[in-house]
Image (cartoon, helix red, strand yellow):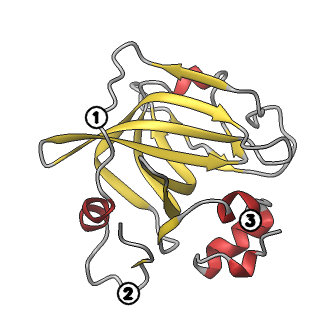
Amino acid sequence: MILVDDLPIKNWAKTLAFDFDIAEELGELNITSVFPKDTTKFKPAWRIERITVYKSSPRSKAAITFYCNARIKSKIYTQHIRIFAPHAPRVDNLKDYLGRRVVGANFICSVRNSKYSTLIPRFIQTVDKKGRKSNPIMRNEDDERNIEGKQESLQLNSFIDYGAMDERTFLETYFSKRDPDKFLINDR
């Protein structure tokens, strides 16, 4: 059993891990960076190209992963954003997120597996082509719009995995080097 206090994340994020009962899920991951409570804005916005839903075990919370294409200094990257215990407001179906732009996020931490770095937010801010917002967010309440734990994968026909930007590039692009409230735990 993983205790929330043992997680190497900020205190505000520990409160979320406790409230949303995701300490086990976070404890199984290799946390590499943690972030302040601020919302990070993306200019230019990232485009959602692929979506997967899964549960790592029968007892774990469902998680949704958005694969977003991000253009940074004329190079395109595919960034992974995973929301645990997700709630999807103002959409009828997950496929409604395909093609939306991610314009901001409130990140808790980033994690790394053997291939990719994944960003773990409390919520992301999305906008469709008509300017309508839907911000997928962590939520515990039983709600008809909470994402179920069934395995699902959706993607645009044009989806290409460009590979993730390295964590150092992400931090230098979206966070001030002088920001004392952000720190890198494990630089690989």
Are discs 3 and 1 less than 8 Å apart at CB?
no
Q: Circle 2 — which element?
A: loop
Of the image marks 2 and 1, the number of the one nearer the N terminus: 1
From the top left corner, tell me how far across and down residue 18 is, in percent.
78, 69
Q: Circle 3 — which element?
A: helix
Mark 3 sits on what residue?
Answer: 23
Left or right: 122, with 60 as reference point: left
Q: CA distance from mark 3 to mark 1?
A: 31 Å
Residue with the most extreme top position: 157
Tell me which amino acid carries mark 3. Answer: Ala
Mark 1 sits on what residue?
Answer: 162
Instruction: Give the residue at x 48% y 75%.
Output: 36
Tell me which amino acid carries mark 1. Answer: Tyr
User: Residue 180 shows which numbered tag?
Assistant: 2
Q: CA distance from mark 2 to mark 1?
A: 31 Å
Closer to the observer: label 2 or label 1?
1
Neighbourhood count class around disc 3 (C-alpha, 10 Å): few under 14, some 14–19, many 20 upward: many
Q: Would you identify the image quadrant in which residue 144 lies?
A: top right
Left or right: 144, with 115 as reference point: right
Neighbourhood count class around disc 2 (C-alpha, 10 Å): few under 14, some 14–19, many 20 upward: few
Q: Would you identify the image quadrant in which residue 187 lies?
A: bottom left
Neighbourhood count class around disc 1 (C-alpha, 10 Å): few under 14, some 14–19, many 20 upward: some
From the top left corner, tell me how far across and down residue 135 is, in percent.
57, 43
Instruction: Give the residue at x 74% y 65%.
Output: 23
Tell me which amino acid carries mark 2. Answer: Pro
- Viewer-closest of 171 and 88: 171
